[in-house]
Amino acid sequence: MRIGILNSGGDCPGLNAVIHGVVGAASKLGMEVIGFRDGFEGLLPPGDYVRLDPADTVGIMKLGGTILGTTNKSHFAAKVGSDDLKQIADKVVDLTKETMASLEIGALIVVGGDGSLGTALHLYHAGVPIIGVPKTIDNDLQATAMTFGFDSAVSCVVDALDRLHTTAVSHKRVMVVEVMGRSAGWIALWGGIAGGANVVLIPEIDFDLDKVAACIREREARGNHSTMIVVAEGARMPEGDLITKDECGNSIRLGGIGEVVAERIGTLTGKETRACTLGHLQRGGEPTSLDRILGARFGVKAVELAHQKKFGRMVSYQAYHVSSVTIEEAVHKTRTVEPDGEVVNTARAIGICLGD
Ligand code: F6P
């Protein structure tokens, strides 16, 4: 059997490890691998692809990004000249079937986040032999206990906090670090705990900046003149606005939640406060060893599922074991931080203020 693989949606550390796992496992089973470039766009007939042999994947495990390239839905929509979701979905089915038939591909491995897995499910329902591999730095999929890329993103946050901590101490400042995670607080919570944050604000817990300010004052009273605050990009101010006033009293819109929190905390405490948004740094660079291993294991499992013709399934990590679930039961089910869960309790126990 010849199998195809594509990456879709935002990139994520560990994607190349998945490709490495897929190519290695396929070659052992005598299967050929075709890698489609730039996500679903690579399927546009006649196909933009490359044949991948084990020799082509030597040394790629440690590389960030993806050697195949990736694109998101809006890019694809522009390429096919439509923004009608139904039309786009039908177009994907037609061109996938056409290209897979012409290249004699018997299974397609889609490595993507929730949106791409939704497309994968649509393809499967239309009769395309699909295997899904979950991918997101946000770690917010219910159907897998962990996604590759998350550990690398958390490591980036920890590295940033270590660096920002020394400058915060030197200047006796409050540092507000905004991190990714979409509507889940996993990166903020894990990064904040591991990086020694004093305050962590996440979407799952309603926070009150007066309480955060009180925590900063208490720290001052104990002789700690700097404070590290981590805020998840999905966290929202109780009043829900991103507006403040400039020195002339004009309303101005601030950037992200990090800047809003920094501005308010500066006003409430009178302390010098700075905001730093880590942004796409969290998705770049080399994957951690955990993400390399998880990615490779996911790739190997995906080939095993294709070989067994267990289509419509998605690789999943459960209880230290890589298994699979149906894509149907995996899509559009997010896993957010449990406000009373064990990780939040750990944060509280080691003295982190959650702002509630
Ligand atoms: O889902 C991964 C993620 O990095 C989110 O944490 C973030 O909100 C989003 O993607 C950013 O996407 P883009 O690459 O389109 O800016």
Image: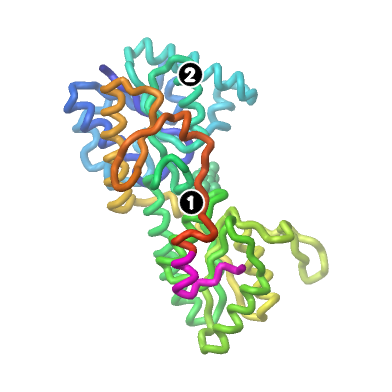
Query: What amino acid is at disc 2?
Result: His
> Within 10 angstroms of label 2, few (less than 14), some, or many (20 or more) residues?
some
Indicate the quadrant where residue 248 lies: bottom right
Q: What stretch is highlighted in magenta?
A: 345-356
Does 82 sit above or below residue 101? below
Q: Within 8 Å of ligand 1, the CB of disc 1? A: yes
Q: Are marks 2 and 1 in contact (CB under 8 Å)?
A: no
181 in magenta: no
Q: Decide if residue 36 is in sight here.
A: no
Report the front residue among 252 and 119. 119
Indicate the quadrant where residue 30 lies: top left
Q: Within 8 Å of ligand 1, the CB of disc 2? A: no
Q: Which residue is drawn at 26% across and 17% down?
A: 1
Circle 2 — which element?
helix
Query: What amino acid is at disc 1?
Result: His
Report the front residue among 263 and 121. 121
Does 215 sit above or below residue 305? below
> Within 10 angstroms of label 1, few (less than 14), some, or many (20 or more) residues?
few
Which labelled disc corresponds to residue 125?
2
Distance of label 2 from label 1 (alpha carbons): 34 Å
Q: Which residue is drawn at 25% across and 31% down?
A: 23
Q: Name the residue under label 1.
A: 280
